[in-house]
Image: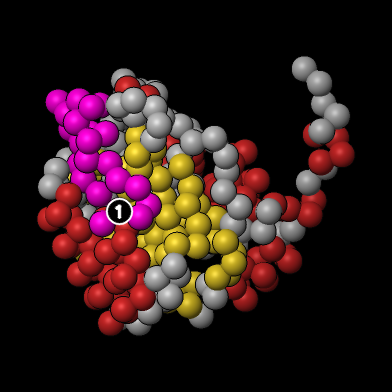
Amino acid sequence: MTKIAIVQFKASTDKNKNLTKILNYIKTAAKRGADLCAFPEFMMFYTNSSQSAAELAKQAETANGEFVSSISNAAKENSIFVVGTFYEKSRKKNRVYDTAFLVGKSGKILSTYRKIHLYDALGFKESRKLTAGSKITRPAKTSLGKLGMMICYDLRFPEMSRILASSGSEVLVVPSAWVKGKRKEEHWLTINKTRAIENGCYVVAPDQVGNIYCGRSIVVDPYGKIILDMKKRQGIGIVNISLDELKKTRKALPLLQNRRTDLYNNFKI
């Protein structure tokens, strides 16, 4: 069994205030015995509709900047894995990457992933402020198992989770800021459960709450059971995951092995 923590909170527009909260959450998660602390998308700060793309880009940082470095130091001090997100500077004028990162217990950044599917749907257009990443990041080997990363809207594209699972991912961590709306909460729960079931993996999905976001941070086991639901509360949720259970599920329901890729690859439209 491995103990993991997910953090659900309402990010303010103040980067420094959010960072103080984040560092405290990391410390608390470690004190409660967690090996991993996972945070939601846009945890760096909340950008409202009135903030311009130029203003957002001005506050963005590199992976070596103060924001990520402070979190890396906290991971090392507390000997805990951390998955977080930040607005990363890009070469494109007035556009930033929405980037997730995995920090190891040594404080070293083990993996980064730039969101490839921008939320240009249902009245939103993230591409007005963000620029899309250009590749899926391979899963990282950790003491928690092989960990793959996606971000929020990526959940709606099953190809991505399947690529990560077929590349070895046993745990998918999906930092999210799921926008409220008609049936959106139902979509959120259903999609997370589906990604877990079809890939026989754990899905760890920390979400923002408040502002325009719906909360409901969840962890789903490989058989599709929600084993943690944060509902609407801010704070830390702790749950155990088991790679032994994952292996049992994949053996009993060998979906990855039963695929007919010989036929899929030959299909022409």
Q: Amino acid at mark 1?
A: Gly
- Locate the C terminus and report the quarter of the image it occupies: top right
Q: Is residue 50 magenta?
A: yes
Q: Is residue 200 left or right of residue 86?
A: right
Q: Residue at x 40, y 45 (%)?
A: 99
Q: Is residue 228 above or below residue 195?
A: below
Residue 233: x and y in percent read 20, 58
Q: Is residue 66 above or below residue 189?
A: below
Q: Residue at x 48, y 77 (%)?
A: 2
Q: Residue at x 31, y 78 (%)?
A: 77
Color scheme of the displayed model? secondary structure
Q: Is residue 7 above or below residue 99?
A: below
Residue 211: x and y in percent read 17, 40
Q: Is residue 80 magenta?
A: no
- Which residue in the protein does label 1 denote? 65
Indicate the secondary structure of the residue bearing disc 1: loop
Residue 52: x and y in percent read 20, 25
Q: Characterize the magenta stretch by its predominant secondary structure.
A: loop
Q: Is residue 6 left or right of residue 25?
A: right
Give, as a single range, the part of the protein colored magenta. Answer: 44-66
Q: Residue at x 16, y 62 (%)?
A: 20
In front of the other: 210 or 107: 107
